[in-house]
Amino acid sequence: MMMKAFLFASWGCFLLQSTCAFQSSSPSSIRPSTVRLHSSVSSVVSVGEGAARDVASMDMWATNVGIQRDGCDLTATYEDDGFGGMVEDWSIVASQPISAGSPVLFVPADAILSSGMIRNELYTFLSSAEASLTDLGMEKDIPLFALFVKVLAEYERGEMSPYYYWLNSLPRKFNNGAAFTYSCFECLLPYAAQLAEAERDLFSKFRETLDYVMVTGFIEKKTRSNMNVLKWAFNVVATRSFLVWEGERMIVPVGDFFNHGTEPEVTIDHDEDGNCVFYAATDIPQGYPLRIKYSGPSDPSALLAKYGFLDEQAPGTFCKMMNIENEMTELGLTASNLLFYSNGEIAPEVYDCVLYSILGRSDPNLQQQFYDAYTSGDEETKQSFHNQYWEYTLQTIREHVEQTLQDLYALSVRASEKDVVTHPRLPVIHKHNEFVTNAFYSVR
């Protein structure tokens, strides 16, 4: 239990015994036996992008299964979709002032979709699929795949599924990498395109791996061959689940309506019975959005690729220096470290990595000396290197900024020549590129 608490805390969450005032027992348990053949129910959730989301019925369902809210409401907002339509987005907003430390949402264990529990229930059916993913070097993706199979199974049950009302409240249209067309990739800088393509590739691998899910009638053939249903189910689990600890992912109904915040208002706890409780991390005024921090890198390009939105509150963006990836790895850095900030500042790690790369091309011995100073925390020696080679570092960054701005302009022109009806994710891609452009102009 202590190990799980530590790993969970590493994602900004804590595994603690609940001390909230919420009722801890569920009035109506919803966890049926998942091991079953498919149902012939015809009334399944419509996954067409134009289908309406029934959040009101889901809210009543949530109450019936013991999900409790305090001081917050589910709220809809509507935004221009970029080509004449409106996009409906649901979030959770404070309905009254909330004090720091107060519980705002309780979700009983029975209502939570847990990858670990699903894998135990479906072990006979999933074992071959899990072995296939392991052979592909995708063992870390097995928990997500288990949730993917679970959502497909519940989708097939239609109104007989205890999760029907939750499924029917979910988005139908997603703007993440798995939903992009190849024309969308062509309108992104290499870093963002690479991340988006990785999401699309993951979906393709999951679709192929479904063939290894054993037993006739479990996930019908017509479901396996329905690309719209498969992509919808994948996007549901990819965007609405979170990593609890290594090897365990969860989807927490209603909790999945919290939007992302770089500086979140809400933290997540799990008590010893597996119930999930969301607490206010700070004093929150009435009418203020309640947000959690989504797992993974907080760079806007990474959030776009995985979740399909632009975080306009992000302080900056990855500097897009793809030519120094090896140097980043050697210095123990990631894209989250090498930032260009929207206020024009540059993360010190950018200077370090650029200089390290310059030294490697000119004198490997000097590069090793800089590496030793960097890894040992010898700031004086490191700064002397920066002083000596400053003009080369500055020139390299300037050239990169100018070239990237030219590339972004070309991408903007390319996107404007494409049909947004055929490629409806282009508006969010344009917003992403505009955010990156503004950050690069500030740095310049």
Image (tube, helix red, strand yellow):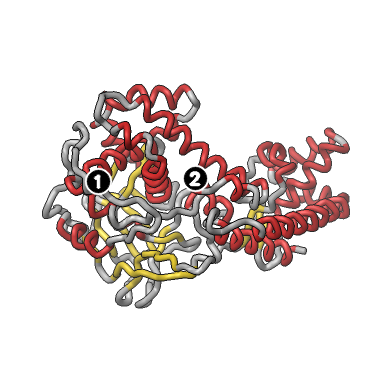
Seen in the picture, residue 347 relative to 156 is either above or below; the reply is: below
Tell me which residue sits at (74%, 38%) in the image. 372
Tell me which residue sits at (71%, 57%) in the image. 408
User: 288 and 221: which one is in front?
Assistant: 221
User: 400 and 278: which one is in front?
Assistant: 400
Q: Do the CB atoms of the residues marked 2 and 1 lie less than 8 Å apart?
A: no
Tell me which residue sits at (74%, 56%) in the image. 410
Tell me which residue sits at (39%, 39%) in the image. 144
Q: Amino acid at mark 2?
A: Ala
123 left or right, relative to 177: left
Categorize mark 1 by other alpha carbons within 10 Å: few (<14), some (14-19), many (20+): some
Where is mark 2, residue-wise? 178
Residue 7 visible here:
no
Seen in the picture, residue 28 relative to 21 is either above or below; the reply is: above
Q: Amino acid at mark 1?
A: Gly
CA gap between label 2 and label 1 equals 31 Å
Task: Determine the secondary structure under disc 2.
Answer: helix
x then y, percent, for residue 95: 30, 75
x then y, percent, for residue 86: 44, 68
Numbered circle sitting on residue 214: none
User: 285 and 400: which one is in front?
Assistant: 400
Seen in the picture, residue 293 relative to 290 is either above or below; the reply is: above
Where is mark 1, residue-wise? 274
Q: Split into 4 quadrants, where in the image is the N terminus?
A: top left
Task: Determine the secondary structure under disc 1.
Answer: loop
User: 206 and 250: which one is in front?
Assistant: 206
Mark 2 or mark 1, earlier in chain? 2
54 left or right, relative to 292: left
Categorize mark 2 by other alpha carbons within 10 Å: few (<14), some (14-19), many (20+): many
